[in-house]
Image (cartoon, rainbow, N blue to C red):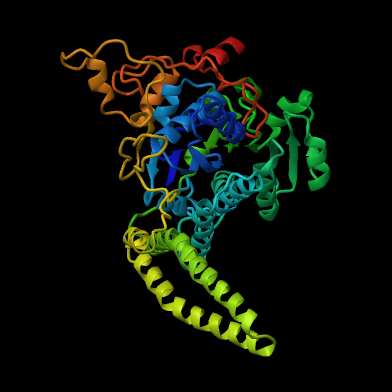
């Protein structure tokens, strides 16, 4: 079956998403480690393939799995290990679903319909890179291949037939629009770029296109020289950073290494616009409160033109629905492929035996003509059953066809078809959700609860938390408040804590080497607390 977990700006604030995505580049390897641990313990793997998408605004995992709940549990544990966060906090942050909601969500994501900047162009490329990385590593399956290929076609159709919001422009371009308004253009303006990654390159290209000529670059990781040589800009050394900040009209902060720019560096700077475009923010929160300094972060870039009644948006959603249906039909047809292959094998094996017998009785051109005639007749005879089987699958009768095929021919091809709730490894798992649900409702507790919950009225804290979003609850937990009763996977809010958490993760492509700065030690897994 197809399953997915998602965590994004749509239901988490960037503080929580920042903490969750640290170390995400290690997630595929850790999922594989957990699968190996299951096998070593005598259990079967639960995930046949996975694709991990990690961007500035989302962390999503798409799975080909036989067991929904166990696979969600495994991914939550993997993210706990890579991020250093308690397992219960991770479960609070993710939504999970299976079957039809999964392609619908992926196709909206790939088409830019769920981006922070509606319709932005970068996400399609990021999804493709994530898929290609999984394919190269051998982590995809035929179902995941089909899923993503339909997604890429969907994104292309939306971009050409129903451009919405930013109309295929990058987030960097939208950020520059905002900065250009604040600065009244870029000509003659001093610009400082902090970072040398993808956003730095996109930002510089936008700046050059808009007439900026006085651009300098500083790299916290010491990579400014190569960037400056390739792009023809000046270098700022570490001892000149403060002076460069104070001289700049625009600071493009996009290194993603965590806080690099502090309030004292801006003192006396005059009027400055700061674009903080890294998920792992480069700008200290107090910089926003300095007089004369305007900070625009990722959360500030959401377009005001995201009207839900936009005709282009309606068309885009219709394109998504068409591709979801096309994927569904394709998968239904694939379910009968083993039956058709088995039928062809039975028929042509019997024909081969008869042809061999005829070759012993006749020879030469006569034998060749007889063989061609037999194969033509069989191909013609097989055509109608194949077309009928395909039609039945397309109209939702794949299960009935497979059952009838088994009854008539005595060939069982149902094993491994990935049906929801199928009995696998000796047991039938709990029912999976019909739509998206929070992962802490699907993940079993890491430790058994001691005692039954009290039957008295819910405490005031629990009643207050009931009205909060997943992001609010997770943020309370991240800041040391703990999960209230009913919100952690254990149902009592006790920190699950896994003593086998992995080594402190490297940053999600940004160079950081520790959990989120300022994250309370109580919300880290035990090993991460020891390493801090």
Q: Is residue 207 left or right of residue 165?
A: right
Would you identify the image quadrant in which residue 292 lies?
A: top right
In percent of width and height, residue 36 lies at 57, 30
Q: Residue furthest front?
A: 361
- Looking at the image, which is closer to me, 309 or 484? 484
Q: What residue is drawn where x is 45% and y is 76%?
A: 382
In percent of width and height, residue 305 lies at 41, 53
Q: Is residue 322 above or below residue 454?
A: below
In percent of width and height, residue 181 lies at 54, 48
Would you identify the image quadrant in which residue 264 lies?
A: top right
Q: Is residue 357 above or below residue 28?
A: below
In percent of width and height, residue 353 lies at 56, 72
How many numbered marks are there? 0
Say if residue 170 shows up in the picture: no
Q: Is residue 254 left or right of residue 344?
A: right
Say if residue 488 shows up in the picture: yes
Q: What residue is drawn where x is 42% and y is 31%?
A: 93
Would you identify the image quadrant in which residue 490 lies?
A: top left
- Looking at the image, which is closer to me, 350 or 107? 350
Q: What residue is drawn where x is 54% and y is 82%?
A: 374
In the rendered image, which quarter contains the C terminus? top right
Q: Is residue 115 above or below residue 150?
A: above
């Amino acid at each position: 079956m197809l399953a997915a977990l998602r965590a994004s700006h749509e239901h988490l604030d960037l503080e929580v998403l920042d903490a969750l995505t640290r170390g995400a580049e290690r997630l595929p390897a850790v999922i594989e480690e957990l699968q190996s641990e299951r096998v070593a313990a005598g259990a079967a793997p639960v995930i046949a393939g996975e694709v991990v998408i990690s961007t500035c605004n989302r962390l999503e995992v798409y799975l080909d799995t036989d067991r929904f709940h166990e696979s969600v549990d495994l991914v939550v544990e993997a993210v706990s290990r890579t991020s250093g966060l308690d397992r219960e906090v991770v479960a609070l942050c993710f939504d999970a679903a299976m079957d039809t909601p999964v392609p619908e969500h992926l196709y909206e994501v790939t088409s830019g319909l769920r981006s922070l900047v509606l319709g932005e162009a970068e996400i399609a490329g990021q999804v493709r890179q994530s898929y290609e990385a999984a394919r190269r590593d051998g982590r995809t399956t035929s179902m995941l291949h089909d899923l993503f290929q339909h997604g890429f076609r969907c994104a292309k159709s939306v971009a050409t037939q129903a451009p919405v919001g930013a109309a295929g422009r990058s987030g960097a371009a939208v950020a520059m629009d905002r900065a250009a308004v604040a600065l009244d253009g870029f000509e003659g303006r001093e610009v400082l770029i902090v970072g040398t990654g993808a956003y730095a390159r996109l930002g510089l290209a936008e700046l050059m296109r808009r007439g900026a000529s006085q651009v300098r670059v500083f790299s916290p990781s010491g990579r400014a020289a190569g960037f400056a040589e390739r792009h023809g800009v000046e270098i700022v050394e570490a001892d000149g950073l403060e002076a460069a900040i104070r001289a700049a009209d625009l600071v493009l902060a996009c290194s993603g290494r965590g806080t690099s720019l502090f309030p004292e560096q801006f003192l006396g700077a005059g009027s400055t616009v700061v674009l903080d475009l890294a998920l792992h923010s480069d700008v200290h929160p107090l910089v926003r409160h300095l007089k004369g300094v305007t900070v625009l972060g990722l959360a500030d870039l959401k377009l005001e033109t995201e009207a839900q009644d936009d005709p282009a948006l309606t068309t885009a959603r219709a394109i998504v629905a068409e591709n979801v249906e096309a994927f569904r039909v394709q998968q239904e047809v694939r379910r009968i492929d083993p039956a058709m292959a088995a039928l062809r094998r039975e028929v042509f094996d019997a024909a081969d035996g008869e042809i061999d017998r005829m070759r012993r009785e006749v020879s030469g051109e006569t034998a060749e003509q007889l063989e061609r005639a037999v194969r033509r007749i069989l191909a013609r005879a097989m055509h109608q059953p194949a077309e009928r089987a395909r039609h039945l699958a397309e109209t939702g009768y794949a299960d009935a066809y497979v059952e009838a095929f088994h009854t008539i021919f005595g060939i069982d091809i149902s094993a491994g078809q990935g049906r929801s709730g199928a009995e696998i490894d000796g047991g039938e798992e709990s029912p999976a959700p019909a739509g998206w649900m929070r992962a802490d409702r699907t993940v079993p507790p890491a430790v058994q609860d001691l005692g039954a919950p009290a039957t008295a009225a819910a405490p005031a804290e629990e009643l207050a938390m009931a009205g909060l979003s997943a992001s609010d609850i997770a943020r309370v937990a991240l800041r040391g408040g703990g999960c209230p009763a009913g919100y952690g996977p254990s149902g009592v809010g006790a920190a699950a804590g896994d003593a086998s958490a992995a080594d402190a993760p490297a940053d999600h492509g940004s160079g950081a080497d520790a959990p989120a700065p300022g994250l309370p030690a109580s919300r880290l897994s035990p090993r991460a607390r020891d390493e801090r």
